[in-house]
Image (tube, rainbow, N blue to C red):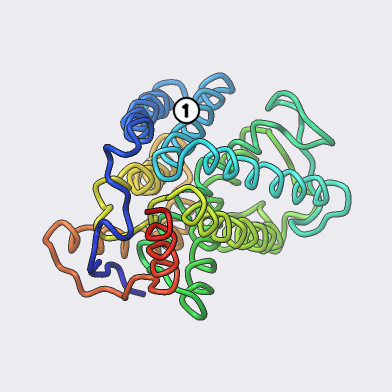
Amino acid sequence: MTGTSTSTSSSATTAAPSSHPGRALAGRAAWVTFAGAVVVQLSFALNGGNIPLTVASVVLLTATATLHATSVGGWKFALGMLGIVAVLTWAAEAVGIATGFPFGEYAYTGSLGPEIAGVSLLVLLAWLTLAYPSYVVANRLVGPGTGWRKAARIGLAGFALTAWDVFLDPQMVEAGNWGWANPEPSLPGTPGIPLTNYGGWLLTAVLIACVLDAWHTHARRAWDAAPLGAPDRQRADRVPYAVYLWTYVSCIIGNASFWERPSVAVAGGILMGLVAVPLVLVLRRGRAGVTTTPAPDAGLDAGLDAGRRREH
């Protein structure tokens, strides 16, 4: 895994901010919604959390992902990203509830509000809150490119999202939001959550990352979308990095303290830390100006340059 790459021409890969003023505004707005989500989540420490606060947190983080995606590739890219995650997660959850595949046999209790085919609408948004940041993080850690690098990028994005569920599922089950028919065997440190759940999450998350990767490639050609995770965009992509790292740290602290699940804090801290810790190191090197990075996606950039020359 590597973290950064030297871009030979910033103008060849990233449109000037002034050429997309609406995108720049969306990027700034993403910080506002993220700050709101942090305030809401900090209040969990005072009352242990409840459904209204959970809804507020999920909606604000969904807005954060959508706004940042808009800053990257415009509203068409953002809406497409929303649709991809929502449709794929709804399909996976609906099939899972009806058949037990791929997560195992489970059911929602109805406490999370409206449902479609037994799937909570809030859960669809919850997937989005970390699906998009996980994909951006994977782009930064693996870098652009096709072949093995593309496979690694997609696989890491899937793992990065799945690792979060090591924190999430125990919290939601304990709160009575859903339950498992066969909760064992389980991952060490997370009793009551079957291993099949994490297998289902990984399968679904990898599929989401695969489609998002294709959608981002399309957006770069069609709408001059920025290269997600590029080293010269470290400042512009700070929001999804911050969301992922905040989620990691807050989940460890919450489980170790007021939720009183220290074993979950350890298990999730180790697994999600396999992504979060390298991300911190890469971002620190980026701030220091270290650029020992993989080459840009030369084939795609060449195609974009050729398209721009034809337009002129």
Q: From the viewer's perspective, is 10 left or right of 68?
A: left
Quadrant (top left, top right, bottom left, bottom right) of the C terminus: bottom left
State the residue at coordinates (29%, 45%): 236
Q: From the viewer's perspective, is 94 left or right of 16?
A: right
For the image, the number of numbered tags is 1
Q: Which of the pair 233/86 is nearer the observer?
A: 233
Report the residue that reaches farthest toward the right.
98
Using the rendered view, name the quadrant where residue 35 is placed: top left
Amino acid carrying mark 1 in the image: Leu
State the residue at coordinates (39%, 66%): 301
Q: Position of residue 115 (x, y in %)?
A: 77, 29
**Callout 1 secondary element:** helix
State the residue at coordinates (27%, 45%): 16
- Above or below, comparing residue 45 to residue 230 in the picture: above
Q: Alpha-carbon neighbours of circle 1 within 10 Å: few (<14), some, or many (≥20)?
A: many
Q: Does residue 142 appear in this view?
A: no
Q: Position of residue 83 (x, y in %)?
A: 65, 41
State the residue at coordinates (71%, 23%): 113
- Above or below, comparing residue 159 to residue 1 in the picture: above
- Above or below, comparing residue 48 to residue 87 in the picture: above
Q: Which residue is mark 1?
A: 60
Q: Position of residue 214 (x, y in %)?
A: 58, 60
